[in-house]
Amino acid sequence: MNDKITLSHGSGGTQTNKLINEVFFKHFDNDILNQMNDAAQVDIDFKKLAFTTDSFVVNPIFFNGGNIGKLAVCGTVNDIAVSGAKPLYLTSAFIIEEGFSIEKLEEIVKSMAQQASIAGVKIVAGDTKVVEKGNVDGIFINTSGIGRIYENVNINCANARAGDNVIINGTLGDHGMTIMCERNKLGLEGNLKSDCACLNSLVDTMLEAYDGIHVIRDATRGGVAAVLNEISEFSNVTIALEENNLPLKEEVKGATEMLGLDPLYIANEGKLCAFVPEAYAEKVLNAMRKHPLGCEAVIIGKVTEETGQKVYLNTIVGGKRLVDMPSGIQLPRIC
Amino acid sequence: MKFVDEFRNNEYSKKLVEKLNNISSEKINIMEVCGSHTMAIFRYGIRDVLPANVNLISGPGCPVCVTPQSYIDTALTLSEQGNVIIATFGDMMRVPGKKGSLSEKKAEGADVRIVYSPMDCLQMALQNPSKKIVFLSVGFETTAPMAAITVMEAKKNNINNLFFFTAHKIVPPAMEALVQDKELKIDGFLLPGNVCAISGTEPYEFLSVDYNIPGVVTGFEPIDILQGLNTVVSLISKKEYKISNEYKRIVKTEGNPIALEYLDKAFNIVDSSWRGLGRIPNSGLEFNSEYEDFDALKHFKIDYEEYDGSPGCKCGEILKGKIKPTDCPLFKKLCTPENPVGSCMVSSEGTCAAYYRYHKDTK
Amino acid sequence: MCLAIPGKVLSLDENKGIVEVGNMKREVFMHLVPEAVVNEYVLVHAGCAIQMIDEDEAKITLDILKELAQNEIC
C-alpha cells in the first residue's frame, strides 16, 4: 500500500479489501468480524437491549489524551453503560478524506481496538467510504453499539428525586479545554489532557455498591450544565450545586480563567453524573473512589425540595446563581 | 492560584456581606460601569446578598455593548474584501449588526478567526503573507495600550499586511454624560479596577469635585466587589463624596504611566458614538497620522458612517441604567441568547445576557 | 472589558515574557511592566501584562479581612 488514502480505497475493489484486511481486520480481529458476513451475526440470550449511535468529527484528530478513534469507542460504550447496560458489540463506519495518511488511520484504528479491549466489547461490523479532498475534515467516524440492560436496574433521566445526591467521578472540563487550546492556537501551553475513557467498569462498580441509582448520565458536549439541565427538565426537579465542591484541575482553572469560560459548560469525555438517594450516596462514593476512573469522585450538589425545573449554584459568597442550559458554543472573551 | 484564591475566601466574603448589611438602611442607587463587574456580580450571586435598600445598576462598561451596529456591518464588509482574514476577540462573534453577525459570516465561508490577544495577529500576519489580516480592535483603556504596542511592533518589523479596525473608547467621558442626565439618580459608583490600573484614579476625581458623587476603585474577585460595595455604601451614608481605592494591589493613583505614554504615542482622542448613549465628545481613540497606514478603513477605502439601534430594543436605556432587562418588551420573548437583538444580550457580559443566565427569577 | 488574571513571570526575553496562570503558560507582552522580574506576579489581560501586583498591598487587605473575620460584627 502506498501511504495515502485514495478514492480507490473506497470503491469496493481490491484496494478496499486490502485496506480492510491490513488495517481494520488486523486490529479489530475477533471471531464475529472474521466471518466477513455482510451483517454481523450474534447470539443473544436477553430480552432488553440498549442501542445507541454517535458520530465523531473532532478537530484536531489527535490531541493530548487520545484521538478521534478513542473518542468514538468510549463515547458509544459510555452511552450504553450509563443506561444501566453491559456494552457488548459496536459497529464502526469511516468516512475518510482522499489524501489522509494511512499511518494515521492505522494509529486511530489501533486506539479503537485498544479501547474496545479495555471495555470488553467487540467491533463486529463496519464500513469505509472515501470522499474527494475537501468533503470531510480528514476523517469522520460513526459508531453504533448494543448492550444488555441489567435486570433489577432502573436508570432513567426522569427518575431524579428530592434528596438525591449528585456525584461526579472527577474534574470538570478537561476534554473541552484540551481541544479548545489545541485547535484555536491560543498560545496556552500546559499539561491539559483529555479525560476520554470508557466508563462501563466504573458504572458496574457503582451498581454493585447500590443497584437503585436513579440516574446516570455522561457529561459530554455542553458540560455538566447541559446534563443537569436535561435531568432537571425530565425529572421535573430543582438541583442545587455547591461551588466549593466543584473539582477542577489547576490547568483547567488557569485556562478557563484566562479565557473567561465557565468549566460547568465545558465538554467532558470521561465523566458521569449520578443521582443517588441520600442514604446510599456515601457508599456509592466510596466504591467509586476505589476505582481508577473515580478516585476524585465528589458530591457536587443535591436535588432539593423546591418546585420547578432549574439548576443553580450556591456560590462562595452565599448567593445563588442560575446555571442555565448552554446556548451556542463557548467562546473565549476579553471582557 | 495566587492572588485569586485568597480573594475568593468563603469566610471573608461572608463577613463582608454581614458588614454590608449593617451600614445603612437608606435607599441608594449604585452603578457599576464595567462589564466584567456585571459578570462577576452575577457569577457570585452578589445581588442575592445585598441589603434590600441597595439598588445595583449595570452601566455602559461593555465595549461590545456600546459598539454601534454599523461597526459590525462594516466588519462584515471588510471580511468580503479579497484575501482578508478577520481576527477578533471571541466577544464580537455573535454581536448582531443589520447584516448579520461575524459568526454567521464565518458559516458562509468568510475567514474569521478568534484571537486571545492582538499579539497573535503579528504571528498571523507573518504566517499568511498573501493575506491581509484585519484585527477588530475594540476595548477600553485596559485594552487600547496593547493595540498601541501591536501596531508599533508591526511598524518596527515592517509587517505590512496587518490592519486595525479600531473602536476604542474611554470611560470617564461616558460617565460624565451619565451623571449629567437628570433622569438618572446615582448615589455612588463602583469604578472599573482594571481601567484604573492604566489610567489611575485622577480621571474620576470630577465625580467627587463637580458632582458630589463618591466612587470606589474596585477589583473583580468576590472579596474585592464586596469590599468596594462596603466602602461606597459607607461613603454615601457618611456623605463623604470622595474617590477611594480598594484595589491597591493593582491600582496606583498615577496608574501605569508607561501604558499612558503608549496611548499618547499611537492615538488621538476623538468624538465617538456609544450605542444607546449617542455621540460623546472626546470619548474615543483613533490611530494618529503616524499609524494611519495601519487603519483598515483607510487601506480598504471604506466610508464609515455610524448608525445603531434596532426597533423595540431598549439596550440604550438599559446601558444608562434607567431600566432593567426585565423592563424591555423584547427580553426573553424576541431577544434571547440564541437569537439576540441587541448587544446587551449577545455579549456574555452584557446586562441582559448576564440577567438571563444568572438571575434566579429567569425561569 | 477587564478580564484579567494574575500570573507568575517564569522567564523574560526583552519585551516578552512567559507567564504562568494555574499551571498554564502563555507568552505575554511585557512592554508595560519593564520592572518585572522572574517569580514576580503581574496582571495579564489579553496577552499583555498591564500592571505589577503589589504583594504588600495584597497582604494588607487580607490582614484587615482576617481581623474582621475574627471580630464580631455589631
Image (cartoon, coloured by chain):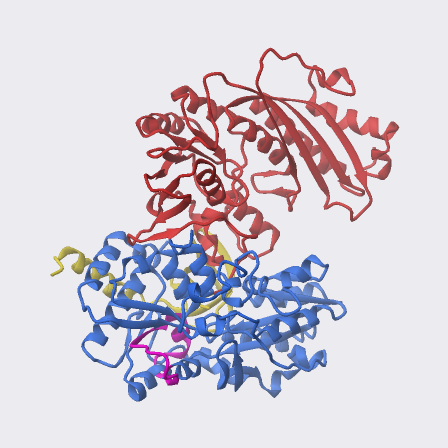
Chain colours: A red, B blue, C yellow
Horizontally, residue B150 falls left or right of residue C51, namely right
Q: Residue at x 24, y 56 (%)?
A: B12
Q: Does residue B74 appear left or right of residue B360 in this picture?
A: right
* Residue B208: % across, % down: 29, 84
Q: In this orientation, which residue lies closer to the viewer: B145 or A81? A: A81
Does B311 appear above or below B352? below
Q: Position of residue C40 (x, y in %)?
A: 38, 63
Q: Quadrant of residue B244?
A: bottom left
Q: Is residue B280 visible?
A: yes
Residue A310 vs residue A196, the one in the foreground? A310
Answer with the quarter of the image where residue A118 lies: top right
- Which residue of the protein is positioned furthest toward the front in this rendering? B329
Residue B141 lies, in percent from the top left, at 46, 76
> In front: C45, or A36?
A36
Look at the picture and state if B336 lies above or below A1.
below
Asked whether residue B182 is drawn in magenta, I would say: yes
Q: Is residue B87 above or below residue B166?
A: above
Name the quadrant of the N terminus of chain A: top right
**B332, above or below B322, in the image:** above
Residue at horizontal 82%, vertical 44%? A132
Q: Position of residue A271 (x, y in %)?
A: 48, 36
Is residue C4 shown to the viewer in this render? no
Give the magenta range. B179-202
Q: Residue at x 41, y 67 (%)?
A: B324
Query: Residue B211 in magenta?
Result: no
